[in-house]
Image (spheres, rainbow, N blue to C red):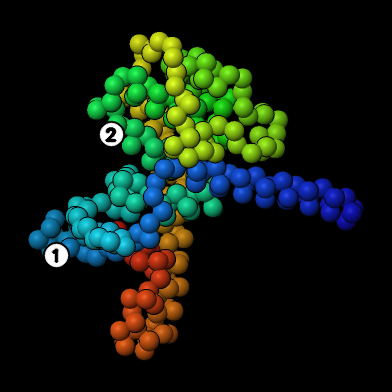
Amino acid sequence: MFIEVFTVFIPAYQVVKHWRFQHAAAARKMSSTFSLATTFNVRPTSKSHSEGKGSMIELIDRNYSVEYLQSGDRLMTMAALTRVLTENPTPLQDFSARCDFSGENIAFLTRLSKWKQFYPVAERKQAFDAALRLYIDFVSPLDADFPLNLSSPQLKALQSVFECAARAVCGKATVEPVLPFAEPPKTAISTGPSETSWLQYQGEIPDAFYEGVFDDAKEHIESLVLTNTWPKFVKEMQEKRRSSVDSERSAGSAGSDGSDGSSRTVVSRISKFVAGLRQ
């Protein structure tokens, strides 16, 4: 019996470990965000701002600091999540790829936000090409290494707009349904932004294509992140913050001689964002 368990579970563990590594790597490559040493510091505002219900979030970067008021937002709200996705999604991106197997969700929301900004100033052909890259990288069951978890109606709606163009550009499926992690990624997920110029669709742009074509998918993925990934991320940051506070207290004398800036870790400052939002 022991031998049977050994021969079954050890290979299974190796497969899951390999899948997890590839999932995290692909999710990071899908995201075009910058990996700066950016941290959050959150502190309560004065009572003059919504009678103390708001919190001031300080976005600390290597080169700059930005402050803004988060009026009445609470930790487990879409508004709090949206601010993180807008200002600095990197910590959440790394967590989701490392611990939650859902890095593609954060990468999709980040890329989609940039596409939304690009759409009004782009020609229709350019906007469609960029949207097609989003579809191929994140949505298409035949092309995406880790397709988004969309409902059947949401998937069919996007397929009706992009699938013909995707087949014209990509040809046959590039992901093996039986062994999706057997080979390195072949789509634009595995390439840098400068290497995706080959995605130039030469056919007609569907009439159904418009700026809000991804809106239903966006709302669905945001809901999944808020319900599943965000609470786990918050919990981890809170736990790391408590551990960091204990460490800082035990090394208090080292911080008093002017070395406080170097002794405060990135985890400590990021987790202050989580702690402050609860005020």
Lower position in the chain sequence, tag 1 or tag 2: 1
Q: Which amino acid, by three-letter code, is at mark 1?
A: Ser
The percent coordinates of residue 267 (x first, y second) are: 42, 66
Between residue 54 and residue 139, name the one nearer to us.
139
* On screen, residue 8 above or below 206: below
Between residue 20 and residue 32, name the one nearer to us.
32
Between residue 172 and residue 209, name the one nearer to us.
172
Mark 2 Cα-neighbour bin, 10 Å: few <14, some 14–19, many ≥20? few
Image side of residue 100 versus residue 125, left or right: right
The residue under label 1 is: 46
The residue under label 2 is: 117
Mark 1 vs 2: CB contact within 8 A: no
Identify the mark at residue 98; answer none if there is no mark.
none
The percent coordinates of residue 19 (x first, y second) are: 65, 44
Mark 1 Cα-neighbour bin, 10 Å: few <14, some 14–19, many ≥20? few
In the picture, the quarter occupied by the C terminus is bottom left
Residue placed at 49% from the left, 46% from the top? 28
Q: Secondary structure at mark 2?
A: helix
Disc 1 versus disc 2: distance between alpha carbons? Answer: 34 Å
Residue placed at 72% from the left, 46% from the top? 15
Q: Which amino acid, by three-letter code, is at mark 2?
A: Gln
The percent coordinates of residue 236 (x first, y second) are: 46, 60
